[in-house]
Amino acid sequence: LKILISNRLSDIINSLINKNLASGGFKMKKTISILLLMSIMIFALSACGVGKPRIEDYEWKMRTIMHAEDNRVVYDATEEESTAHPEAKIIEMTLVAKDGNITITDVTNNKTYKGTYIVSGRNPEGTDYHITIDGKSGYAGVAMTTYADGSEEPTLPISLDGYSMYFYAEPKP
């Protein structure tokens, strides 16, 4: 797209040069200035969103699943985390998203859940999604989480069917 726009702007500029040589150049300078400003704005806007984490960029690992009504943790990813939540069951769960499709794999119970996602919004911190998993609709957001020690990691909270699921990122191999 950038190349197409750049080539088109070049053609317009060349055409204007040929048409406006006789006008003394003032009109030409003004026109070139406007076209240059427009091309800079197009290139700047096309870079928006670059560098923000997206759901497709990672393989996600489940950290916790909480009941939305009372925030009770019902699933934890490791026994270390479950010491704070003794009632929580330990499961290993992953989420992979690609080309609008989501696959959640419950490794512990040998179950797979399929769904879809679409971008519902972008903001300076990340991307929001509308998701559907096994016919149930919900919302998700991907953004960087900053911890008290200053470290950051991409996170994926999901709200679906009365549960809040929290995933952390692992870079795709």
Image (spheres, rainbow, N blue to C red):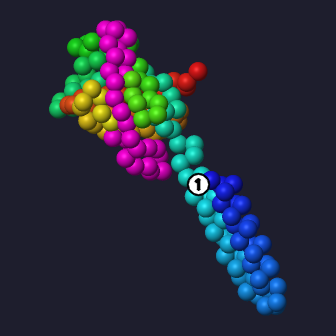
Location of residue 33 by image quarter: bottom right
Q: Position of residue 43 (x, y in %)?
A: 64, 58
* Residue labelled with disc 1: 46
Q: Is residue 90 above or below residue 99?
A: above
> Above or below — where is 121 with respect to 7?
above
Per the rendered image, the range of residues in magenta is 104-130
Q: Amino acid at mark 1?
A: Ser
Helix, strand or loop status at disc 1? helix
Queried whether the magenta region covers residue 110, the answer comes back as: yes
Q: Taking 157 as reference, is 36 above or below it?
A: below
Front-most of 30 and 90? Answer: 30
- Residue 133 visible to the viewer: yes
At 32% from the left and 21% from the top, the residue drawn is: 113
Q: Quadrant of residue 71?
A: top left
- The verdict on residue 172 being magenta is no
Q: Is residue 163 left or right of residue 123?
A: left
Helix, strand or loop for the magenta stretch, by majority: strand
- On screen, residue 132 versus residue 57, left or right, reads left
Residue 21: image location, x then y, percent: 82, 85
Q: Identify the residue at horizontal 73%, vertical 86% (top origin).
A: 27
Q: Is residue 152 above or below residue 108?
A: below
Residue at 73% from the left image edge and 68% from the top image edge: 11
Can residue 147 be seen in this snapshot?
no
Q: Position of residue 24 (x, y in %)?
A: 82, 90
Q: Is residue 46 left or right of residue 6?
A: left
The C terminus: image quadrant = top right
Q: Identify the residue at horizontal 82%, vertical 90% (top origin).
A: 22
Q: Nearer the viewer, residue 85 or 167?
A: 167
Question: Which percent across, then down, holds residue 172?
Answer: 55, 24
